[in-house]
Image (tube, grey):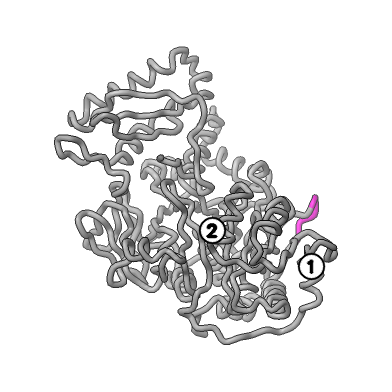
């Protein structure tokens, strides 16, 4: 069966894995399994629901944390030929309403934890004609409709003709600088990214979703690819329950962003003591975890070696929302240390003035209603990634920094802040760091690991950090030296993808 649309993904998974558990999650103390057949049928019910409400072909937002209802609603919307608009559930209500307006949304699925948004959108977003609550048992006065009631009323087969190159979803970037952009991705963009590379992950592999579901890395790799290859995805219900859920679900594999990987390593190291490292990891991760896929930002390659000591393989990849998202990835049998992996089979790259440009079937259609920004980013089908680096003779990608973050000093020297940040963040006392230019020299703002300082009885944290910086300065060219430091008392502001907001 040819896989060109998300409808094809659902049809394939229903046929190939029918009675197998696709999703596993908790409701209070009960663990519930949903089979691949149930996923297909429930997503078709949502498609019928969308059509019955006159919303076929419209823009429909989905707001909430990762839940079974969220997932089948996404497929139900897109497989009706409509456009799904996943929204970051952690944003303030005012900001969400602005995105709903910008994306021309006419229907909203929402989780009751963001009932405030539905109330505000009812007043501020007159274009939205239907509000559907994932938790409401019955449709209510005031216009809120029950997802479960509508699902039951619309059970049955559903299929419609979908052009693989039609708009499938608008995903707003959680940019570290500037205004978020609505990335337009087609069915082909998403399906090709999910299915073009065989990672040799066996059907029945247990994974656990830990990233925000509105983040394209989670959406494409955890959800779309997961359904295509037949994994059992366990849904983590809260960031507060991660440790407990790892022990409950015992995943074989998880997708994480670097900041989380770094914090997990700090905890593993602290818990070490006299226990063998592999036993420490088994106790922390439920006993079965073998693989962590890292994406969303650059991970210091040192962590690949560090986790290997605990019996865990880290596969570092590279991508961006505008490429659906994966551009390259390392594999257990094909990897290079220091790289962010080999180019995906559907992707080619070239380097223009040190910047990596990519082209292929996963490159976005453009930014929604932002023609100038689209023209700046796309040129003759090539996506300008904004990342500095190179591609070697074996098609492995190496990243050295971000063009927009590049520090250009008065003497003409270019400095990549990420290079300095990666080097200094290897120090145990440095928990988070941001390097920037100030008055034509380099400044570092550091959030120390106060727990580590307490454990090691470090009384003068500033002095200890200055010594770390002095050691770094000794070994580096004059233009790359850090001239001043700021010590933070609180963590940096971050996007929901756990990237530090730079400005």
Q: From the viewer's perspective, is residue 214 above or below residue 272? A: below
Q: Residues within 10 Å of mark 2 (few under 14, many from 20)?
A: many
Q: Dot 2 lies on which element?
A: helix
Residue 385 in the image: state x and y as whole percent: 33, 58
* Main secondary structure along the magenta-highlighted residues: strand
Corner quadrant of residue 198: bottom left
Q: Is residue 22 visible?
A: no
89 or 345, which lies in front? 89
- Residue 316, magenta (yes or no): no
Is 108 placed left or right of 352 in the picture? right
Q: From the viewer's perspective, is residue 152 above or below residue 421? A: below
Corner quadrant of residue 466: top left
Residue 240 in the image: state x and y as whole percent: 66, 41
Q: How much space separates mark 2 and mark 1, taking CA atoms?
A: 25 Å
Q: Residue at x 76, y 56 (%)?
A: 31
Q: Is residue 441 visible?
A: yes
Q: Which residue is mark 2?
A: 218
Q: Residues within 10 Å of mark 1 (few under 14, many from 20)?
A: some
- Give me the disc on residue 437: none
Is 365 placed left or right of 381 in the picture? right
The region drawn magenta spans 28-32
Is 50 placed left or right of 265 in the picture? right
Q: Which residue is mark 1?
A: 148
Q: Residue at x 84, y 63 (%)?
A: 140
Residue 231 in the image: state x and y as whole percent: 59, 65
Q: Dot 1 lies on which element?
A: helix
56 or 327, which lies in front? 56
């Amino acid at each position: 069966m040819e896989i060109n649309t998300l409808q094809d993904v659902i049809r394939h998974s229903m046929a190939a894995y029918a009675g197998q558990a696709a999703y596993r999650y908790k409701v209070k103390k009960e663990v519930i399994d949903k089979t691949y057949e149930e996923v297909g049928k429930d997503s078709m019910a949502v498609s019928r629901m969308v059509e019955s409400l006159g919303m076929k072909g419209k823009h429909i937002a989905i707001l909430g944390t990762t839940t079974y209802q969220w997932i089948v609603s996404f497929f139900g919307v897109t497989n009706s030929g409509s456009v799904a608009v996943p929204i970051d559930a952690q944003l303030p209500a005012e900001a969400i309403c602005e995105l709903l307006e910008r994306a021309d949304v006419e229907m909203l699925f929402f989780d009751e934890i963001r009932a405030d948004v539905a109330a505000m959108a009812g007043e501020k977003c007159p274009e939205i004609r239907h509000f559907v609550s994932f938790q409401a048992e019955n449709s209510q006065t005031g216009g809120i409709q029950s997802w479960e009631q509508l699902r039951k009323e619309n059970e049955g087969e559903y299929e419609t003709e979908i052009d693989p190159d039609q708009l499938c979803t608008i995903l707003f970037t959680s940019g570290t600088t500037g205004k978020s952009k609505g990335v337009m991705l087609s069915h082909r963009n998403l399906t090709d990214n999910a299915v073009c590379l065989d990672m040799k992950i066996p059907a029945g592999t247990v994974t656990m979703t830990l990233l925000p579901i509105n983040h394209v890395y989670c959406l494409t790799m955890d959800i779309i690819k997961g359904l295509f290859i037949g994994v059992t995805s366990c849904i983590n219900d809260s960031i507060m329950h991660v440790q407990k859920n790892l022990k409950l679900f015992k995943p074989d594999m998880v997708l994480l962003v670097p900041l989380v990987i770094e914090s997990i390593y700090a905890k593993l190291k602290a818990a070490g003591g006299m226990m063998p490292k592999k036993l420490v990891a088994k106790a922390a991760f439920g006993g079965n975890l073998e693989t962590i896929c890292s994406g969303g930002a650059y991970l210091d390659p040192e962590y690949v070696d560090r986790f290997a000591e605990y019996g865990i393989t880290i596969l570092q990849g590279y991508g961006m929302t505008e490429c659906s998202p994966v551009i390259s990835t390392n594999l257990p049998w094909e990897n290079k240390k220091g790289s962010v992996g080999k180019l995906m089979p559907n992707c080619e790259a070239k380097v223009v003035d040190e910047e990596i440009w990519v082209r292929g079937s996963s490159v976005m259609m453009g930014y929604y209603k932002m023609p100038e920004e689209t023209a700046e980013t796309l040129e003759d089908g090539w996506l300008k990634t904004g990342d500095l680096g190179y591609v070697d003779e074996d098609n492995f990608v190496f990243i050295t920094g971000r063009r927009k973050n590049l520090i250009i000093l008065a003497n003409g020297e270019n400095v990549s802040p990420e290079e300095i940040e990666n080097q200094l963040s290897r120090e145990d006392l440095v928990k988070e760091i941001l390097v920037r230019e100030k008055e034509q020299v380099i400044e570092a703002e550091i959030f120390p690991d106060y727990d580590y300082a307490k454990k090691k009885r470090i009384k003068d944290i500033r002095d200890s950090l200055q010594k770390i910086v002095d050691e770094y300065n000794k070994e580096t060219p004059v233009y790359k030296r850090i001239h001043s430091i700021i010590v933070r008392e609180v963590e940096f502001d971050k996007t929901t993808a756990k990237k530090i907001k730079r400005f």
